[in-house]
Image (cartoon, helix red, strand yellow):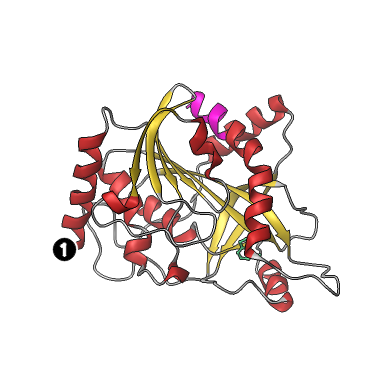
Amino acid sequence: MTYLEKIHESANFIKSQIPKTPDVAIVLGSGLGDLAEQIQNPIVMPYSTIPNFMQSTAVGHKGNLIYGELGGKQVLAMQGRFHYYEGYPMEMVTLPMRVFNALGISTVFVSNAAGAANPTYRVGDLMIIKDQINLMPNPLVGKNLDEFGPRFPDMTRPYDLDLIKKCKEIAAKLNISLQEGVYVGGTGPTYETPAEYKYYRHIGGDVAGMSTVPEVIVARHGNMRVFGMTVITNEGFDFTEDFVNDGDDVVLQAGIAAKKMTTLFTEMIRNL
Ligand code: HPA
């Protein structure tokens, strides 16, 4: 089966399970699966039941695709995503984005947990992703999928400016403070060395993560509108003598900040 056939097989399966085309797709990052609990009248599709979907092996990632209502709109949420560090090829990491595109979904919200390279950021902060730097293999390497987009996609505005504006307005109303910065995506699975966090800062990054960037490249290739949000789960500066980066703590900190993000996403989706 070709990759294109796989995309359509997955899309056709999902279509057969849901009553309407979703207004928006949502990707929930490490420890951020809580938003899924707020989805009304949910139809839960475990990844194991969806043709061609991988298993979600990462800590804090559940592995369900959930359709339902949020903020009065129809949403399709990934409770857990696929990462390059899990050993999946980039085309499998980004298959869900292709499938969302094939389903006719034109807007996608992505979220993640990340470590701060910007020393003014603190654990628990939310950050609007305004831009990204790709330090992973580019998921579009290989034959171009002309059905989705051009060989050389424009990446001048990876994150939708209107959605960013809307997010700031809603956050101001709700009294939620926000950072706004650049997400640097590396392969992981190692957390960064102190020198690498400094390097990320020097090249213009604010946070370090291991996801999101390939998904956004593929979403933009297919001309989907993207909004991205990071939850700061650890600080990559001023390391104390006994500090260690730890995956369980990342998930714990993400869980604590998840409610704020859920509120913001819900209100933004209501106003789409
Ligand atoms: N680096 C990379 N990925 C991450 C981090 C980090 O510090 N925190 C959460 N995900």
In this orientation, which residue lies closer to the viewer: 25 or 42? 42
Where does the N terminus fall, quadrant-wise?
bottom left
Which residue is at a point 45% across and 21% down the rendered structure image? 72
Is 53 colored magenta in this rendering?
A: no
Residue 116's place in the image compared with 73, above or below, is below
Inspect the image, locate mark 1, and give the three-letter code of the amino acid beneath it: Thr
x and y percentages locating residue 166 in the rendered image: 58, 31
In this orientation, which residue lies closer to the viewer: 187 or 153? 187
Q: Is 26 on the left or on the right of 125, as rendered?
A: left
Residue 20's place in the image compared with 132, above or below, is above
Q: Is 78 on the left or on the right of 129, as rendered?
A: left
Q: Report if residue 206 is visible in the image.
A: no
x and y percentages locating residue 30 in the rendered image: 55, 54
Image quarter for ligand 1: bottom right
x and y percentages locating residue 100 in the rendered image: 32, 44
The residue pinned by badge 1 equals 2
Marks counted in the figure total 1
**What segment is highlighted magenta in the picture?**
265-272
Q: Secondary structure at mark 1?
A: loop
Q: Main secondary structure of the magenta part?
A: helix
In this orientation, which residue lies closer to the viewer: 157 or 61? 61
Which residue is at a point 74% across and 75% down the rendered structure image? 194
Which residue is at a point 64% across and 60% down the rendered structure image? 248
Label 1 CB-ligand 1 distance < 8 A: no
In this orientation, which residue lies closer to the viewer: 33 or 20? 33
Could you say which quadrant of the image residue 75 lies in? top left
Which residue is at a point 42% across and 58% down the rendered structure image? 56
Local crowd size for mark 1, using a 10 Å CA cut-off: few (<14), some (14–19), many (≥20): few
